[in-house]
Image (spheres, grey):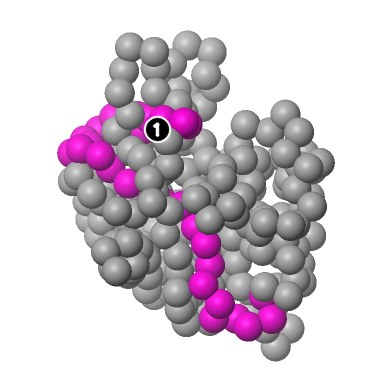
Amino acid sequence: MEKQMNSQVIAKQFLHVFEHLHNGSIHSDCRRLLGYELKRCKSSIPNAGRGVFLSGKASAGTPVAIYPGTIFLPGDPSLLPSIRNNYLLRRSDGALIDGKPFGLSRLIFSSCASRNYVDGNIELQDETWLKEEGNTRNPLSIGHMINHRPDDGEPNVMYTEFEFESVPLEYRRYIPHVYYSSHETEEHQLPIKSIAMVAVRDVEDEELFSDYCFIATSQ
């Protein structure tokens, strides 16, 4: 029950963000509404490319970002997209989330997303996290760009499993996930397996770092 309640708390906080997104208020004033905003900039780690910086302040325990990508369930054919793929995360229930925004992984996500519409025009996912530049529909869907902590540093966010148990259809367009298996999308309110980036301490005006070797189970 503790895991379920914690998962629900994480999902509830993201749903609150989706509500603001749906009302059109968060992109214009994200920092005022959340206390922080996320920016993609050159990482402070040499030769690490770009990273994610938090501008503002987030207290310990705050889910600050979502790790996006295609969800592969046990038994799904994930071998080819897994080759040389450092963006693939495995949950404790065996599900994989592929957050690689280019190559075959990108094509798979886009292909799966193309079938996920209700009544022909209601999107059931956010595909804009694949963009290299510009704003994403959900400004928190860039968890895949958070770098591993430097050798002499500690992570300030942690991968944490959770699930969207029930989401209004009009909010689904802000969730950066698709199931690889088409039958998982036939019931639109099936739980959506996800991973949040949760602050492990107070974070203020700094680059976000994770530990690629550890995923918490919301306990």
Amino acid type at circle 1 is: Ser
Relative image position of residue 187 (x, y in whole percent): 63, 83
Of 213 and 107, the residue lying toward us = 213
Residue occupying the point 70% across, 88% down: 119
Of 71 and 16, the residue lying toward us = 71
- Does residue 191 belong to the magenta stretch? yes
Find disc 1 in the rendering and name its residue: 210
Of 4 and 156, the residue lying toward us = 4
Can you say whether 104 is above or below 42 in the image?
A: below
89 left or right, relative to 165: right
55 left or right, relative to 202: right
Residue 217 in sight from this viewpoint = yes
138 left or right, relative to 20: right
Can you say whether 122 is above or below 39 in the image?
A: below
Relative image position of residue 60 (x, y in whole percent): 20, 44
Labels in figure, total = 1
178 left or right, relative to 55: right
| The residue stretch that appears in magenta | 185-213
Can you say whether 125 is above or below 57 in the image?
A: below
- Does residue 1 belong to the magenta stretch? no
Residue occupying the point 40% across, 32% down: 210
Residue occupying the point 72% across, 39% down: 82
Quarter of the figure that contains the N terminus: bottom left
Quadrant position of residue 207: top left
Q: Would you call the spot at circle 1 few (<14 residues within 10 Å), some (14-19), or many (20 or more)?
A: many
Quadrant position of residue 115: bottom right
Can you say whether 37 is above or below 111 in the image?
A: above
Residue occupying the point 61% across, 40% down: 88
Q: In the structure shown, which secondary structural element does the residue marked by tag 1 occupy?
A: strand
